[in-house]
Image: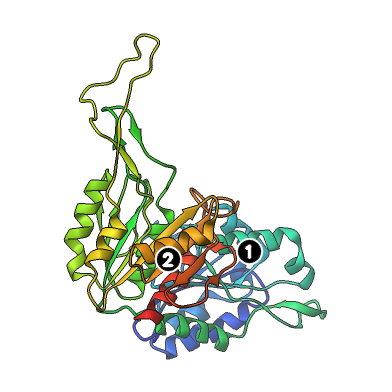
Amino acid sequence: MLKGKHIVLGITGGIAAYKSVTLLRLLVKRGAEVQVVITPSGKEFITPVTLSALSGKPVICDFFTANTGEWHSHVDIGLWADAMVIAPATACTIGKMAHGIADNMLVTTYLSAKAPVFVAPAMDLDMMAHPSTTANLALLRSYGNHIIEPAEGELASHLTGRGRMEEPERIVEVLDEFFSRKQPLAGKEGLVTSGPTYERIDPVRFIGNFSTGKMGYAIADAAARMGAEVTLVSGPVSVKSSEKGVTTEHVESAREMLASCEKAWPETDIAIMCAAVADYAPENPSGTKIKREGNEPPHITLVKNPDIAATLGAEKRPGQILVGFALETDSEESNAVKKLHSKNLDMIVLNSLRDPQAGFGTDTNKITIFRQGAEPLRFPVKSKREVAVDILDEIIKLH
């Protein structure tokens, strides 16, 4: 599965850099095109001449070529890559990645990368166990990076413990497994809703909620990476999709979102209703700003918005899969199960505002999945990117 893939191999200044030569050789033998980006300290352990000979490409270390002044664009490298592998990843580089300290070509490339990133830590056992290292790795996981856990064994210090960089053969296996499972949704049409809806009171004010769209966008991007062509119907948010297979339609109100969904639904194989749609809207929005005059506040009559998931559920044909979301503050599970049945859903994803690492605006989520005729599936706190994969994996089992 690595044939033709563009791999950025990042090498940092640790004794395990000698293993990177074997890793590079294995990637090239599998048919991957590899661009090596090395830190200045990495060159103290392995020479660019060796790496260039094996990769067939000049090794990049600095922002500029000293003799010619040629600029090496970290942005272009990040966009070129299908995956980025940092092996070995020292405690120093892990800390810089976690906190965005872009003082070398490797970290700036990492910050520009749109592709999945795999990090293979390598350091002494006490450094590996230090709270700062643990916290930095947790941060990288929360960003959606894949951590290839170090092995136990004899270390460069001649101590024995956890901190050995995973063997190159295993790193290649991890990449193979990742790319081989990427396309289970190839040929499928996906529909994802995301973000809030805004229901205008007047040209200045609206009824809305705190949704940022992060979860829905993570699902849309993950589905595209798995091969689906995705229509993402998005309320007003600041996040953007980075995947070529995602077509985004921007809407404002619940009725606009319903119209876009009904248009896409007949050709859709899998629909995931992740948006936080406002339940009510002003009956008669004002065309001009409502002035604060007198002592009495304005009277605003609300009307119910259409239930998008229920509308699609009523129109669902055999073979289509419809997934809903439930964000609850009380009686969470019973409310989620009620929605599962009343809206003719195949699956519903529950998250609770009572979980501090779930809900609006966070980069993590904690979910429980309910399916028709099956026991609930409970998941621990994960990054929203990882949660998106968990949700899609369960949807694939339904198909």
Residue closer to the observer: 29 or 206: 206
The residue under label 1 is which amino acid type?
Answer: Leu
Tally of numbered discs: 2
Disc 1 element: helix
Disc 2 element: strand
Q: Earlier in the sequence, mark 1 or mark 2?
A: 1
The N terminus is located in which quarter?
bottom left
Residue at image coords 27%, 74%: 320
Residue at image coords 40%, 61%: 339
Residue at image coords 48%, 81%: 175
Label 2, residues with CA under 10 Å away: few <14, some 14-19, many ≥20: many
- Outermost residue toward the right? 159
Q: CA distance from mark 1 to mark 2?
A: 31 Å
Residue 197 in the image: state x and y as whole percent.
32, 44
Q: Is residue 282 in sight in this rendering? A: yes
Residue 323 in the image: state x and y as whole percent.
36, 66
Residue at image coords 51%, 87%: 173
Vertical order, 103 against 12 (above or below): above
Q: Which mark is residue 348?
A: 2
Residue under label 1: 137
Vertical order, 360 against 388 (above or below): above
Q: Quadrant of residue 347?
A: bottom left
Q: Tell me: 330 left or right of 287.
A: right
Q: Which mark is residue 62?
A: none
Q: Is residue 68 in sight in this rendering? A: no
Q: Quadrant of residue 278?
A: top left
Query: Mark 1, mark 2: which one is toward the viewer?
Result: 2
Residue 97 in the image: state x and y as whole percent.
57, 58
The residue under label 2 is which amino acid type?
Answer: Ile
